[in-house]
Amino acid sequence: MGVLANVFEAAGLATVGISLIRGQAEDSRAPRFLHCQFPLGRPLGRPGDAAFQTDVLRRALALVARNDVPVLEDHPVVIGDEAADALACTLPPRADDGLHPAVAEARGLRAAYERNRAATGRTLVGRLGDADLVADLVGRFARYLDGETLAEVDLDRRCVAAGHDVRAYYEEAALALVEHVPGARQAESWFFRSTEAGRLLRAVREKLRDADAHRAEWFGLVPVTQV
C-alpha cells in the first residue's frame, strides 16, 4: 500500500493510508499514514462501533492536508489482540449416526452457519465450494489421517484452500451461537482449541510437515499462533 501511495503521489494524487504494522509503514515512507495499533483484520478498530470507526476515518482523512511528508501519526487508542482468550461457544449436540466426530460436528453447525449468513448477507466460505461441501472436506481430512494419500482424498495442492473453507464455516457459525461481537481472533482460538475439526486440521498439518510435504501444502492450514 505504501508503494502504491508513492506512485499515486508522483502522479499528483494526494493519498493517506491506515497502518496496522508500524515497521512496514516506516519502511515504505508513504506520504501520509495513520498508524492504528489494532488487531490485524480490524483496521477501523471495534466492530459495530460506528462512532469509533468514524473517528479513525476522520483522523486519517485529516492528514490529507499535510505537506510535511512523510507523516506517520498514531491513533491514541490501542486495541489488543484477544486470541489468548478463546471464545466461549457451546457446540450444538451431534447426532450419533456413526460418522467421524468432526464430520458430525460440522453437520451440526449448519443451522448456525445459515443463521449468520442470513443475518450478515455474506460468507468467506467458497474457495473450493459452498457450505454443502464443508462436512465432506472435513471427512477427507479425516481419511488422510487414517492413511489415504492427499491424491486419494482429492486434496492434492488444495489442503490450505479446504482448510480455509472449514475454518470460515466454523467461525461464522460461532457468531450465531454467541450474543456479542467476539474479540479479535477469539473465534479462531475457539476453532483450533475446542472443536473436533480444529484439532483435525492441527493433526493434518503435523502429519504433512513430518512427511516432508511441500510447505505450501501445510503451512497455511493453521496460523502459527495456534500451532
Image (spheres, rainbow, N blue to C red):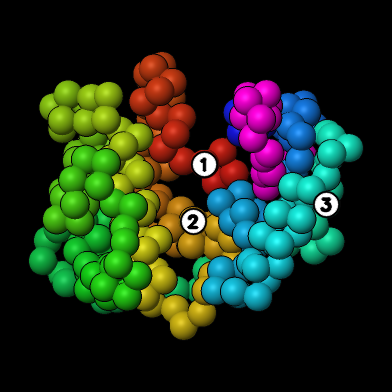
N-term mark: 1 or 3: 3
The N terminus lies in quadrant: top right
Which of the two marks, 2 or 3, is nearer to us in this view? 3
In the rendered image, the residue lying farthest to the front is 12
- Closer to the chain start, of discs 2 and 1, is 2
In the rendered image, residue 201, in percent from the top left (x then y), is placed at 37, 43
Counting residues from the start of the chain, the first of labels 2 and 3 encountered is 3
**Residue 159: x and y, percent?**
30, 33
Q: Amino acid at mark 2?
A: Glu
Left or right relative to 117: residue 25: right
Going by the numbered disc 1, the residue's amino acid type is: Pro
Q: Which residues are magenta?
A: 6-22
Point 10% across, 66% down: residue = 97
For disc 2, the marked residue is 188
Q: Nearer the viewer, residue 37 or 185?
A: 37
* Residue on which disc 1 sits: 223
Q: For this rendering, which residue is in front, 134 or 69?
A: 69
Mark 3, Cα crowd under 10 Å, few <14 / some 14-19 / many 20+, is some
Check whether the beta carbons of the residues at disc 2 and disc 3 lie within 8 A of each other. no
CA–CA distance between discs 1 and 3?
A: 27 Å
Tags 2 and 1 touching, CB below 8 Å? yes
Q: Which residue is mark 3?
A: 74
Residue at 44% of width from left, 78% of height from top? 178
One can see residue 197 in this view: no
Q: Give coordinates of residue 54: x percent, y percent.
A: 65, 68
- In the rendered image of this protein, does residue 223 appear above or below residue 48? above
- Which is nearer the eye, 218 or 65? 65
